[in-house]
Image (cartoon, helix red, strand yellow):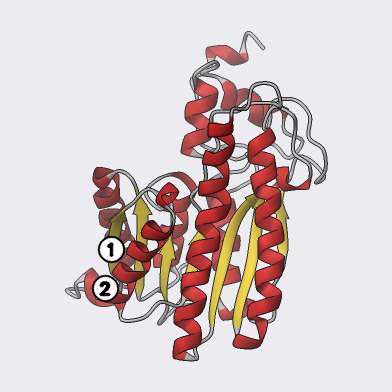
Amino acid sequence: MAAMQQQPLSKTTDGRPPLSTLRVDKSLEGKAVIITGGTSGLGRCIAIACARAGARGILVTGRNATRGGETLDTIAREVVAAHGPSGVPSCEICARAFVAVDLADGEAAAKKIMDAAVAEFGSVDLLVNSAAACFPRGDLETTTPELWDEMMATNVKAPFLLTQALARHLKQRRARGAVVNIGSCAAHGGAPFILAYSCSKAALACFTKNTAAELRPHGIRVNQVNMGWCLTDAEDRGQSATNRFWLAEADAASPSGRILRPEDTAASVVHLLSESASMVTGAILDISPDMLPGIMSGETCC
């Protein structure tokens, strides 16, 4: 282990299983998508994947306007690289927008997001509930009521309100659509040190199943992707606070050769949003190469 700690923190996968490919295709052509938490980590990667898949409009939400602007610039570059004929402005291929919002604001936040998306794109087809509160962590003894409420507000209530708003919008238009919720393998039981987080992701899985059943007759699909341990920005910040070599150690200890990267999850999200998955609804897809879903041990979660 001492020899390993002499190596700098590496976020590449050289010599390990390759990243899932963010394909350049047109599987989301003509679709406008909302992605919460889309200015960093997994959400940002999903936004880029949607751009590469030909989405006509992408709205990302976040709390940091600077990161929001940077994300829109990145999307523009990806659009031109993937789909843009010479001289065609990226905005003519894929409209893009950023909404600064705190999802903990509940109904006001959901309304602000939907209103902005409709104003920008005319209509909305797809939703990815990617934003999540992951830190701080706590067990039964250390979890405060405030932490519990924060986890539930961001991880459960916000997806509920946004899915409700999109469903009303789609039903009014008599249009098909899709929702993908980003969950966690912690939904299957989690671990004591992430009590509130585990409970919130279990609730999200139940929400996914129920809304899928309700909205199926309307042509609206709802699915969920449960991540195992993944290198997200939030995970990196949290782990690096106590161990700057955590990623190298986690990759080395993984039976699969590495833990997840955002690209692995984003590829599955785009598939579930697309018409290639038109008969898939109510599915909970576990992307967990290192463990079977169930009670987790140690200090690993996503």
Q: CA distance from mark 1 to mark 2?
A: 7 Å
Query: What residue is pinned by disc 2?
Result: 120
Check the image and report above or below for 267 versus 31.
above
Check the image and report above or below for 283 versus 243.
below
Residue located 79% across and 29% down the image: 297
User: Which residue sits furthest bottom?
Assistant: 174
Image coordinates of residue 18 in percent, x first then y, are 60, 47
Check the image and report above or below for 175 versus 72.
below
Write down the quadrant of residue 144 in the picture.
top right
Quick check: marks 1 and 2 in contact, CB under 8 Å?
A: yes
Image coordinates of residue 191 in percent, x first then y, are 75, 33
For residue 97, which numbered disc appears in the image?
A: 1
Image coordinates of residue 44 in percent, x first then y, are 41, 52
Write down the quadrant of residue 53 in the picture.
bottom left
Tell me the element at label 2: helix
Residue located 33% across and 51% down the image: 101
Q: Is residue 177 visible?
A: yes
Q: Is residue 80 found left or right of 223 in the rendered image?
A: left
Query: Which quadrant would the C terminus be assigned to in this image?
Result: top right
Write down the quadrant of residue 157 in the picture.
bottom right
